[in-house]
């Protein structure tokens, strides 16, 4: 529900659990007056005047500088007296850097806006509402529209900004964040998601110190290292209690997410395109739209925040028809064979896999050009007939005959120096004239901002997809972008390159899903460097990490699930010692951890030890039984091994609180310990639940019955298993 109170000049956005207020302050500056748990219908404009007694005469205007530098702002601008980080910086042909936005107008509408060429939220139930506040700077001749979208079924607010030029000459946007707001600090902590290749999105919680704390990427993609997410939370906030604010960015390129703590102990929170290496030339009459960003407030700790993000992405961002469907259980040959495979090997894997109930074979890197290692052929998207004798179709037909689907790997944005494509078009690689372009994994990045490059690649990719019955594509991206130059961009537009690159990527994936509407697309970037909500718009699942070790996956999947639904997390069972870290874990534990994502296998099933192989049908049965719960239920983190160094525990619970699947993973066994009691959360206190161990001998572990209140307050017993890295699944079902 969005309202405007003309007396108090305050806009108010109410979601189910939060209130967000914007007040038109003195001289038309837009103040952020409140965000948090629901409040009464009071005049909150006093909250914008904290430097004097707030209820004193508010009509007295003090000079601009003493207002702007402490006012809680809604979209702070550069160069006019707010000396904190700005959300908007523009220069014009005078070379001056100053933007001063004043309120002009507003509109409250049913429905939601769409963004040209960018992923954006939608609403099928027609219950979304949008607030558009128009502000302007008459000296520059620009208008800025601030968009706020709310939904009836999630506690998230989606924001973006549109900059419209009425100037006579081009202006240059040097920074345009998607979301900003200021708030009082209350001894808050911040959480960011950090990592590296094979160690993505580990939760990092730290006190907010004075100055700026920023998570960012300048790598041309979201990155393994830092993530477009930041949470601000009370020091005492836990998984289930306390106030938590979370921001996230629906984008797949360079970003900046920051919190700045200032002299008055207030916080500025911002997220948007990274201003570093960004400058957008805006011609007279043209507009620039920022990507959308999301902010949530939870009064129920981190789990409440996760629910808001998960609901928003599942209900209002992921478009794929697979969204609410059981995903085919796949077997991918990457860790099984790397580049060393041929038709026979793939058919052998598929044949054995089909016997155990696996439903799709995915042929990974190495099937094209003359690729037999990572140093050639990217860009030559035609079949390597030395490996795949007779081509692709006979292989796919054979796999189909086994009753399995077929999927294929591409890395469409790349070119190897050793490729026909590069020999024909060396200028298609991103490069700065006169400078040796930087190489990584023996490859260059294609300048997909150029239409002829995109068209060439998409023609090849689509040609392959039409040549056989291919039902799944893994779209990979294995290096980051530097030495940026484009033959298509004049000098005063080179600052547009990174954003244009992301728009080009989106247009390629849009074309792919438009031309192949039934295709299951999985994004990937050297593991999880492009695990971001921008990609959800095109693919319902993303490969989470190249680390398939069940124990490393605990922290990766915990950090990922903090923001993103389990239904989006690509997770596979692989062999031990694990290829990324050498750890040996039980096959059972590997299965249980992968069950909390889009389940599959990434191993040579023809060489699997018989006792492990024998467990596959049982794991598949578990996936089939519990996948709807995992995909559509509410996720609750119960305990984190990152915090307690002993065990991990999480749960997926149905919306009606009648069923829940709990996964418990013990790190190390210790002798002579008591049985541990796990206290679950979110259950119906009054219901009686039957508790079973669905993958265990019922004689040894008979079902028990307990009330929801007992399970939540006294806990249920979990075994201490013999050996390290053991795991158990617990199923909880309400009695009728
Ligand atoms: C990185 C991906 O994350 C892997 O799964 C695999 O597809 C390789 N690239 C192939 O080069």
Image: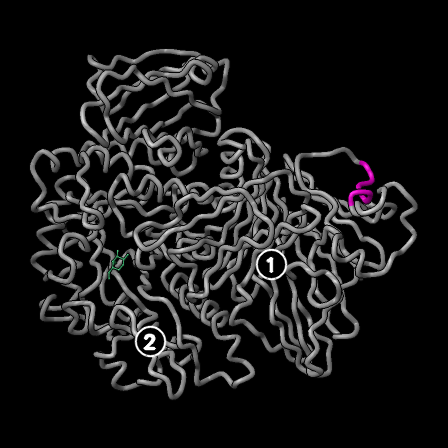
Which span of residues is magenta-colored? 42-47
Residue drawn where x is 54% and y is 63% of the image: 273
> Percent x, y for residue 92?
69, 79
Looking at the rendered image, the quarter that the N terminus falls into is top right
Q: Regarding mark 1 in the picture, which secondary structure is present there?
A: strand
- Residue 214 in magenta stretch: no
Residue drawn where x is 51% and y is 59% of the image: 119
Residue drawn where x is 44% and y is 48% of the image: 193
On the picture, is 65 further left or further right than 316? right
User: For the stretch drawn in magenta, what is the main secondary structure?
Assistant: helix
- Looking at the image, residue 205 lies above or below residue 177: above
On the picture, is 287 further left or further right than 307? right
> Percent x, y for residue 599?
28, 42
Looking at the rendered image, the quarter that the C terminus falls into is top left
**Which residue is the site of mark 2?**
438
Check disc 1: other Cα within 10 Å, few if <14, some if 14-19, many if 20+: many
Q: Which mark is residue 178?
A: 1
Q: Quadrant of ligand 1?
A: bottom left
> Percent x, y for residue 104?
80, 62
| Residue 154 in sight from this viewpoint | no
> Based on the displayed image, in which of its 4 quarters is residue 65 positioned?
bottom right
Q: CA distance from mark 1 to mark 2?
A: 31 Å
Q: Earlier in the sequence, mark 1 or mark 2?
A: 1
> Percent x, y for residue 380?
24, 75
């Amino acid at each position: 529900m969005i309202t405007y109170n003309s007396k108090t000049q305050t806009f108010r956005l109410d979601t189910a659990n939060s209130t967000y207020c914007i007040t038109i302050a003195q001289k038309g500056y837009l103040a952020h007056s409140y965000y948090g748990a629901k409040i009464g219908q009071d005049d909150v404009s006093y909250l914008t005047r904290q430097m004097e007694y707030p209820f004193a005469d508010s009509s007295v205007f003090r000079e601009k500088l003493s207002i702007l530098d402490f006012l809680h702002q809604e979209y702070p601008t550069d160069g006019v007296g707010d000396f904190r980080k700005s959300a908007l910086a523009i220069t014009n042909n005078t070379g001056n850097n100053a933007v001063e936005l004043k309120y002009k107008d507003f509109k409250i509408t049913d429905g939601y806006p769409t963004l040209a060429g960018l992923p954006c939220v939608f609403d099928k139930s027609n219950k979304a509402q949008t607030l558009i506040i128009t502000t302007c700077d008459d000296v520059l001749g620009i208008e800025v529209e601030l968009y706020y979208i709310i939904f009836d079924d999630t506690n998230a607010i989606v924001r973006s900004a549109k900059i419209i030029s009425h100037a006579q000459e081009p202006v240059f946007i040097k920074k345009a964040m998607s979301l900003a707001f200021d708030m009082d600090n209350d001894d808050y902590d911040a959480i960011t998601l950090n990592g590296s290749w094979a160690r993505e999105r580990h939760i990092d919680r730290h006190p907010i110190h004075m100055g700026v704390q920023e998570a960012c990427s300048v790598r041309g993609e979201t990155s393994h290292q830092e993530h477009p997410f930041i949470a601000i939370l009370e020091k005492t906030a836990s998984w289930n209690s306390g106030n938590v604010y979370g921001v996230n960015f629906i984008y797949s390129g360079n970003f900046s997410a920051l919190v700045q703590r200032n002299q008055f102990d207030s916080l500025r929170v911002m997220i948007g395109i990274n201003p570093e290496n960004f400058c957008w030339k805006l011609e007279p009459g043209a507009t620039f739209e920022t990507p959308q960003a999301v902010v949530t407030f939870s009064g129920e700790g981190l789990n409440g925040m996760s629910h808001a993000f998960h609901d928003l992405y599942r209900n209002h961002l992921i478009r794929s028809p697979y969204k609410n469907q059981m995903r085919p259980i796949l077997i991918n040959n990457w860790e099984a064979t790397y580049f060393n495979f041929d038709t026979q090997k793939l058919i052998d894997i598929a044949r054995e896999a089909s016997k155990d109930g696996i439903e799709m074979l995915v042929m990974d890197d190495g099937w094209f050009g003359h690729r037999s290692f990572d140093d050639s052929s990217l860009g030559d998207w035609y079949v390597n007939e030395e490996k795949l004798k007779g081509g692709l179709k006979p292989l796919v037909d054979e796999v189909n005959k086994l009753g399995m689907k077929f999927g294929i790997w591409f890395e469409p944005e790349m070119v190897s120096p050793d490729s026909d494509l590069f020999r024909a078009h060396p200028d298609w690689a991103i490069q700065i004239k006169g400078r040796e372009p930087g190489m990584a994994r023996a490859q260059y990045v294609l300048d997909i901002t150029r239409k002829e490059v995109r068209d060439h690649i998409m023609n090849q990719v689509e040609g392959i997809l039409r040549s056989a019955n291919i039902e799944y594509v893994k779209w990979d991206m294995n290096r980051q972008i530097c030495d940026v130059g484009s033959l298509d961009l004049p000098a005063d537009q080179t600052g547009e390159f990174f954003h244009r690159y992301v728009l080009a990527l989106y247009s390629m994936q849009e074309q792919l899903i438009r031309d192949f509407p039934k295709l299951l697309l999985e994004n990937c970037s050297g593991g999880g460097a492009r695990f971001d909500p921008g990609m959800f718009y095109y693919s319902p699942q993303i490969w989470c990490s190249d680390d398939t070790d069940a124990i490393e996956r605990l922290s990766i999947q915990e950090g990922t699930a903090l923001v993103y639904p389990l239904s989006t997390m690509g997770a596979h069972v692989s062999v031990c010692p694990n290829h990324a870290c050498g750890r040996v874990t039980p096959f059972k534990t590997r299965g249980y951890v992968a069950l909390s994502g889009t389940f599959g296998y990434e191993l040579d099933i023809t060489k699997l030890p018989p006792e492990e192989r024998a467990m596959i049908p049982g794991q598949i049965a578990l996936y089939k039984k519990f996948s709807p719960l995992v995909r559509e239920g509410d996720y609750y983190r119960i305990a984190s091994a990152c915090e307690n160094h002993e065990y991990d525990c999480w749960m997926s619970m149905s919306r009606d609180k009648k069923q829940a699947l709990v996964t418990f993973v013990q790190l190390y066994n210790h002798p002579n310990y008591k049985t541990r009691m796990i206290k679950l959360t979110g259950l119906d206190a009054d219901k009686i639940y039957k508790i079973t161990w669905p993958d265990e001998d019922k004689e040894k572990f008979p079902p028990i019955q307990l009330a929801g209140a007992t399970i939540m307050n006294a806990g249920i017993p979990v075994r201490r298993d013999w050996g390290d890295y053991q795991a158990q699944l617990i199923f909880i079902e309400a009695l009728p």
